[in-house]
Amino acid sequence: MVYDSDYRENDISALDTKTALTEQGADSPGAFDVPVDARKITEILIAIGLDPTADTLLGFSSAIKLSGAGVKGLGEGCFPGPVGTICGAAGTSAGMVYKKAQRYLTNIPVKGGGKINVDGYMHGEDIGNIHMLAQLVYDGPIQGRIIDMDYREQDLTAANTLVALNTKLGATEGDFKVAYSKIGEIFFGAGLKPVAGPLRMCPTLHLEGNALVRAGNYKWLGPSGGQQDDIAVSGASIITDLEKYITDIDVKIGNTLRAKAQMIEDDAGTAYAIVGLGYVS
């Protein structure tokens, strides 16, 4: 078991469309090559760079999917990435943004010498172009709990109205179909296409369904904020990772879970909500 790390990247310029992350600067190595002595992926990082359409107010979310013979027994392999807002007129508003990568601590077995494909997705709105980078860490000194992950996303267009999150990989998927017995981590947030304020943007998440072993509330908060009156000339572009919750939720394999989200109090525009459920053994 030897520590190693690798990355792939690419431009994503089409909404809800699979883009293979196969590049590495001036090189095009293709899929990830799993080190021959590697045992597990212990970290996944997803970073976003922005090359947006100028003078726009737009919001987005993002995701990746892992597949290929290099990952052993991975069911969904779908991990949500950062979310964000493109905000303001180029000549008058803040035009720079930097943010650390979305990070997952994982425990995903790999096949040494195999190949892993990573595809990237831009969800929400077509903001022009996002540059996505995905990093895989093999056999790191800190091993996570997540053995698989699945996500759903959807647009929120009205205040105080619960909306089912039922889209994945650019297509309507419906509710989560549970293939594991425990949810150990939940990641939730929303990118925003803002309208003129002052307005609050406070997304919340609800889980329900017959997959839940016990009755409960199952409600969480996402990263919150707001906007000023003249958002087109005073706002800043934003990239943020998702709120992370360490959980211990027993679920029934073969049953379904429905994720719902809403904007609390104000209709701040259109919020592009996304939730990831991290399954653990």
Image (cartoon, rainbow, N blue to C red):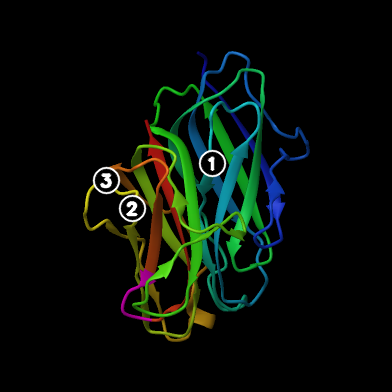
Indicate whether 280 appears above or below 83: above
Pick the residue in front: 257 or 9: 257
Mark 2 / mark 1, whichever is N-terminal: 1
> Which element is circle 1 on?
loop
Residue 264, magenta (yes or no):
yes
Label 2 – label 3 distance at C-alpha: 8 Å
The disc at residue 210 is: 2
Q: Secondary structure at mark 3?
A: loop
- 155 shown above or below 240: below
- Image quarter (top left, top right, bottom left or bottom right) of the C terminus: top left
**In the rendering, at what x and y percent does residue 61 appear?**
53, 60
Q: Going 46% across and 56% down the picture, which residue do you hit? A: 175
Q: Which residues are magenta?
A: 262-266
In the displayed structure, 183 sits above or below 188; it is above
User: x, y percentage for residue 60?
Assistant: 55, 64
Q: Which residue in the protein does label 3 denote? A: 213
Q: Residue at x 48, y 33 (%)?
A: 43
Q: Which residue is mark 1?
A: 76
- Please give left or right for residue 35 compared with residue 103 in the image: right
Amino acid identity at mark 2 = Asn
Where residue 177 appears, as percent x and y from the top left, is 46, 48
| Label at residue 65 | none
Q: Mark 2 Cα within 10 Å, few/some/many (few <14, many 20+)?
A: some
